[in-house]
């Protein structure tokens, strides 16, 4: 800007950022339009000293006016002169520690083992409420595969913890007669045991407990709810729960080379009055059947 002696000039004070500047239509600092109320006219009394000042300039992209590089806004049109690029945060790196990798591996192994167990139970055990698994050697596995088809296992001997006289004897459980039943003579049957011995070694697959089939008798007697099952080759008790309904109730039970099995009553369903007749104080069961495959010597 060329300034001569006596030239009338306007000194502005920016109302937005308080920057003082001479003439110019816009504040060089913030680009605000100057407020005339904050401007005062003055003139130089003496001839201004002439100096040659070299400074870097920046050309306004809006109006083409050259501005000092220190200006943020154009003195002519107020446009923003330049703005540095905003910093961009770097993409975070995904890091995994040895501990995280170990947890991931352990979790994968647990999932695979669980899936394998489910598949095994579906194939060999089924959907029953109880099952026990036996460890098979390669030779024993071959024997089981080569055995005869699934059969009803013959029971040659039996023993019950108690029985309500000859009419409701333990033997009635294995006679195949739907008109007979066993009644336990103990206190409501809880804690009663039934032991059956087979005519040889069998790979068991299921047990069927048959409740009384006549409505009134079914209601008036106590009934088996929960049991623990133990066999001579699988001494760990396998628990099972059977529904409170008349007729056959299937328990899936997988063993290998079993000759004797014991069923212990752990919980019971209560008896009740029926058709005006009082409830009995004994537990009743009509039949027990075992199904499996004969194991060759």
Image (tube, grey):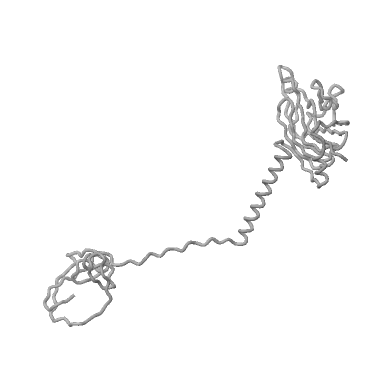
Q: Quadrant of residue 120?
A: top right
Q: Position of residue 279 (x, y in %)?
A: 74, 22
Q: Quadrant of the N terminus?
A: bottom left
Question: Residue at point 21% right, 63% down?
Answer: 33
Tell me where residue 201 appears, x and y as whole percent. 86, 37
Q: Toward the viewer: 223 or 125? A: 125
Q: What residue is shown at x 16% (from left), y 81% (from top)?
A: 48
Q: Is residue 202 left or right of residue 213?
A: right
Residue 273 on image: x %, y %: 72, 21
Check the picture and name the quadrant holding the C terminus: top right
Image quadrant assignment for residue 153 = top right
Residue farthest top in this picture = 276
The image position of residue 100, as x and y in percent, is 61, 58
Q: Is residue 277 left or right of residue 185?
A: left
At x 44%, y 63%, the residue is: 89
| Residue 148: quarter of image | top right
């Amino acid at each position: 800007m060329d300034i001569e002696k006596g030239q009338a000039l306007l000194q502005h004070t920016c109302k937005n950022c308080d920057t003082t500047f001479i003439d110019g239509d816009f504040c060089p600092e913030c680009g605000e339009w100057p407020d005339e109320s904050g401007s005062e006219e003055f003139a130089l009394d003496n001839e201004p000293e002439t100096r040659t000042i070299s400074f870097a300039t920046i050309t306004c992209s809006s109006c083409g006016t050259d501005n000092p590089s220190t200006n943020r806004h154009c003195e002519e049109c107020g446009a923003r002169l330049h703005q540095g690029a905003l910093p961009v945060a770097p993409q975070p790196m995904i890091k995994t520690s040895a501990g995280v990798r170990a947890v991931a591996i352990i979790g994968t192994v647990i999932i695979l083992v669980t899936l394998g167990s489910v598949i095994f139970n579906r194939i060999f055990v089924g959907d029953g409420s109880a099952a026990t698994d036996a460890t098979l050697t390669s030779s024993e596995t071959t024997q089981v595969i080569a055995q005869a088809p699934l059969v009803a296992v013959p029971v040659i001997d039996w023993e019950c913890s108690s029985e309500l006289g000859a009419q409701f004897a333990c033997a009635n459980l294995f006679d195949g007669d739907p008109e007979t039943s066993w009644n336990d003579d103990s206190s409501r049957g809880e804690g009663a045991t039934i032991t059956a011995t087979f005519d040889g070694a069998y790979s068991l697959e299921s047990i069927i407990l048959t409740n009384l089939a006549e409505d009134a008798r079914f209601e008036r007697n106590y009934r088996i709810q929960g049991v623990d099952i133990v066999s001579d080759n699988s001494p760990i008790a396998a628990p099972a729960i059977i529904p409170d309904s008349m007729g056959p109730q299937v328990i899936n039970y997988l063993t290998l080379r079993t000759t004797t099995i014991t069923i212990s009553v752990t919980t019971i369903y209560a008896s009740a009055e029926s058709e005006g007749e009082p409830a009995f104080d004994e537990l009743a069961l009509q039949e027990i059947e075992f199904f499996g495959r004969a194991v060759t010597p």
